[in-house]
Amino acid sequence: MQPRVTLKTIAAEAGLSAQAVSMALRDHHEIAPATRERVQALARDLGYTPDPGLRALADYRTRRRGVSARWSEIALVHNWESPAAFRGDVFHRELLRHVTRAAEARGIRVSVHWLGAQGARTASVFHLLRNRGITGVFVAPPALTMEEPRVEIPRGPFQVVTFGPGHLYRDHHTVQSDYYENLRLAWRMLTERGRRRIGLAHHKRQGWRTGHAWRAAHHVEALAAGHVPGDLPPLELEDPSAPEARETYRAWVSLHHLDAVISSLYELPDWNRALKRPPEVATFNVRGRNSQGIDLRLDQMAETAVELLLLEMQRSLVHRTALPFRVLIPGRWVDA
């Protein structure tokens, strides 16, 4: 009878430790791909079959190793122009608050790290995270003052969940608003209120931020409502805070005879006061229940992101996820 082929047998043939062989056979990411392939091929040639009981014990020990060190803190990184600019943005300040609350409910602290304008400090920040044993990372959405700035995640033991835009992070998990369906919901609610000429107004750079989903959904809904192409062109403002933005908006409303506007701009209530017949407004940036429109449900977005990151941290102890998840959070209508 041939002796049973064990991990030690493979280790002796491969010139590795039994632990390294075990990790290679389980596709552990800390073992180089070439070494994994060599060990797995050798195991097949030798006729190795794993012991189910020992495999379960090894997996359990791997998952338990270093839990307190790596799961006590999660990083949220951003590449805005400055830390103050990030903290000063209402939407992102609220998102960070919800993420912090969701993580703290699981005993995890969230630390914010600035990667520098245009990501100049990215390498040093991730080096710091690696040295501190922080592997779980959230990537905040980019600022609207930049042109599609993507955070480059260095190679290493990091598990990443981004808040979009999804097209910038095809290799990482993403949790973001369901922009397309949120606009369709706003259109439907305004239509039920008798509105027929519904416009879309937003910051120009929110086009690429949303993957142009708002514009696409608005176009589809307008066609379905019987409007001809070009009848209700969206208003995309380069700088809503500029003095001329108010007059541009008013002229747009008057020219197209709008009776409702779907928008992400906080300025619209003030701009509408000078209009004789101001359009009804539905906003995407609902703060509390004082504004009518779509509640983006940042609490659910944060809860989902934390759960997804913890799941990825657990899975990555054994293997990496081949396909990234895309989680779209649906909004809900809120009356004023």
Image: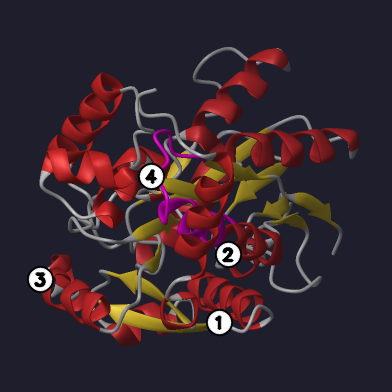
Would you name the residue on which mark 4 appears? 320
* Measured Cα–Cα span from mark 1 to mark 4: 22 Å
Would you name the residue on which mark 2 appears? 306
Which residues, given as a range, are shown in magenta?
308-325
Marks 1,3: beta carbons within 8 A? no
Q: Earlier in the sequence, mark 4 or mark 2?
A: 2
Q: Quadrant of residue 120?
A: bottom left
Q: Provide residue 326's location: percent of width, then percent of height.
A: 52, 39
Q: Residue at 67% of width from left, 35% of height from top?
A: 181
Q: Residue at 55% of width from left, 67% of height from top?
A: 267
The tag on residue 120 is 3
State which mark lies toward you, 1 or 3. 1
SS at mark 3?
Answer: loop
Residue flagged by tag 3: what amino acid is it? Ala
The tag on residue 108 is 1
Marks 1,2: beta carbons within 8 A? yes
